[in-house]
Amino acid sequence: MSTLPAIQAAGQAGKILPETAKNLATWLGASLPAWAVASIDELVAKGAWEELNNRFYKDLEFGTGGIRGRTIGLLPTSVETGTPTGQGTPAYAAIGSNILNDFTLTRATIGLFRYTKKYLTAAGRAEAPSLVIAHDVRHFSRHFCELAASAWTKLGGNAYIFEGPRSTPQLSFSVRYLKAHAGVVITASHNPPHDNGFKAYFEDGAQVVAPHDKGIVNEVNAVSLSGLAAFLEKDLSRVVTLGRPADDAYLAVATQAAIDPSVFKKTKLKVAFTNIHGTGGVMSVPLLIHAGAEVHEVQEQVAFDARFPTVKSPNPENAEALSLAMKLAEKENLDVVLATDPDCDRMGVSVRGPDGKQHLLTGNQIGALLAEYRLTKYKELGIIPAAGSQSVAIVKTFVTTSLQDAIGRGHGVKVINTLTGFKWIAGKIRGYEEQLKAALLKEQGIALDYDATPFATRVKLLQKHSTFYAFGCEESYGYLPNDYVRDKDGNAACLMFAELCAAVKAQGKTVIEYLDEVYLKYGFCLEGVVNLYYEGASGAAKIKRILETYRSAPPKAFGDVGVTKFQDFGVEVFKDNDGEAIPKQDLYVVTLANGYSFAARGSGTEPKMKFYVFASAPVKTAAELATVKTQVKAELDRVKALIEADAQQRAEG
């Protein structure tokens, strides 16, 4: 039986989904290259129906991180594998509509170009669309970068790429620095090695949000597979490779993440740093050395490597990923471990405690420490009023610790909660920028060049006419010090946290002791996350069932713990502390009778269901803190188990 009839028969027999059969027929009818047809033929001949389902049951969609997915199939074909590179990169990215490969990446690039062109035309702007592209160290990252740049220039635009791997925050900055209309990072962040992604940015340097995201998706969907052939061969003759000036410009603004650089002169901070085989060492190490820190790199993890061979997952959220750095820190008696993920937008930390050993901190703890330190330091230096101001804001996500809400209230500044994804934090920054420019134009007739205005001047103007963004973060190890960059910045985060460590060390304390002071001041908070992974088409259906049943049959209790409040962000109307409406999203916040709460949402970048659980308790004295920590952790673990059991039951229907 030939391939197409075999696919149709498999569909009729229920071996593959109707969507899979339809997509396969479309792709086979699109004059694919011989290797791609041979790959489909091989999978059909093997009866690899589950693999075909996973590859073709849907088209890749823009989520909170743009497009992200496998580039290497779970069951690679012989022609895809070909002769791999020394790091195991196959000859071709896997064929599939739900795979990041030459076809889906080119469609995304063409769709982004067409949307950008229409956007500029509608605004009466005649310039050719310009695009900056950065990439990490993953399989096919450089190839995808060059392929996208080639396609963009063939369409009539201008494209800029870097000479090698660069971090996501540098891309965000470079869009504004080059006054480009769009940006792309080829990365799957901290996902497994078989994944890659296409993260899209717009001219403000932030990831795309509505209406741009939907507009781009519509343009991407309108690109026919048959129209891709002319773009699949790379031509880099019109692509500009950025040099040292672009790097220096980013380093100059990343350096300003330090509020008080003088603290590095008061003590010698000793840092263990690991880039976990990714891009972090390119900029984080120079930043730390220039600040005055003594940096010890983890040599086993310095080299770029798409396999991330020394870790189970290149994710600084995971203790295992920091184990080599922690061993180095304990051996050399270093103060702090700083670790960045492959595209260096996230940073993980461990610190030396009073016992001399290394202690991991969670993303929530890191963010709370930075918020407390930076607001305190801004006040000390007279940058914001000592009593606080509602014209100063820290911005966080709903799924980030409530300890930061307490810190913001304690300092008398505004706290803004956003949906999950740093693009929403960047959206608030953009709003504050636009409010300032509109006020100056209306009141004084001044058309402010925002990026050309010195930071110190911007800070004053924002507090007078708008809101000064003082700090922002999310629980998943993402932090942003100021508005030069419009995405979380692992490079700047390393410098920010190093400054905090140096300041605390100069006072003769450890970061652990400083964190306990924060708890005594604002109350003890502890968070936990339940991650339920569901791969492939069947997994997507389980995640959908959990989300839908939360809405149709909201939980009333978890074991003996009752539910006192259920909030559905996909139906109800919520506003932030600026009075702006929160966009609708399948996010649920559940308040429990024991005072704890949790948020439930499907991940926008990985095949998983996430539950963020929040626990807290007042602390009156230092003597009772240890007991409170133990009691809260025990109850939190119990509640997490109850939530997970309920979710597993919902997933199975």
Image (cartoon, rainbow, N blue to C red):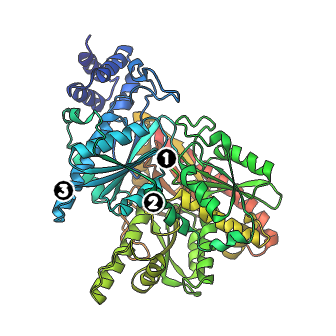
- Dot 2 or dot 1: first in sequence order is 1
Q: Looking at the picture, does residue 398 appear above or below residue 382?
A: above
Would you identify the image quadrant in which residue 388 lies? bottom right
Q: Which mark is residue 118?
A: 3
Q: Residues within 10 Å of mark 2 (few under 14, many from 20)?
A: many
Disc 3 marks which amino acid? Lys
Q: Which residue is mark 2?
A: 487
The CA distance from mark 2 to mark 1 is 13 Å
Residue nearest the observer in this picture, 3 or 77: 77
**Secondary-structure class at tag 1:** loop
Q: Residues within 10 Å of mark 3 (few under 14, many from 20)?
A: some
* Numbered circle sitting on residue 189: 1
Query: Which quadrant does the C terminus fall into?
Result: top left
Q: CA distance from mark 3 to mark 1?
A: 30 Å
Image quadrant assignment for residue 350:
bottom right
Residue at image position (36%, 80%) is 436
Residue 333, given in percent of the width and then of the height, sits at 80, 54
In the shown orientation, is residue 324 left or right of residue 204?
right
Q: Amino acid at mark 1?
A: Ser
In 3D space, how far apart are the residues under numbered discs 2 and 3 (Cα atoms)? Answer: 25 Å
**Marks 2 and 3, the one that precedes in the sequence:** 3
- The spot of residue 501 in percent (x, y) is 69, 65
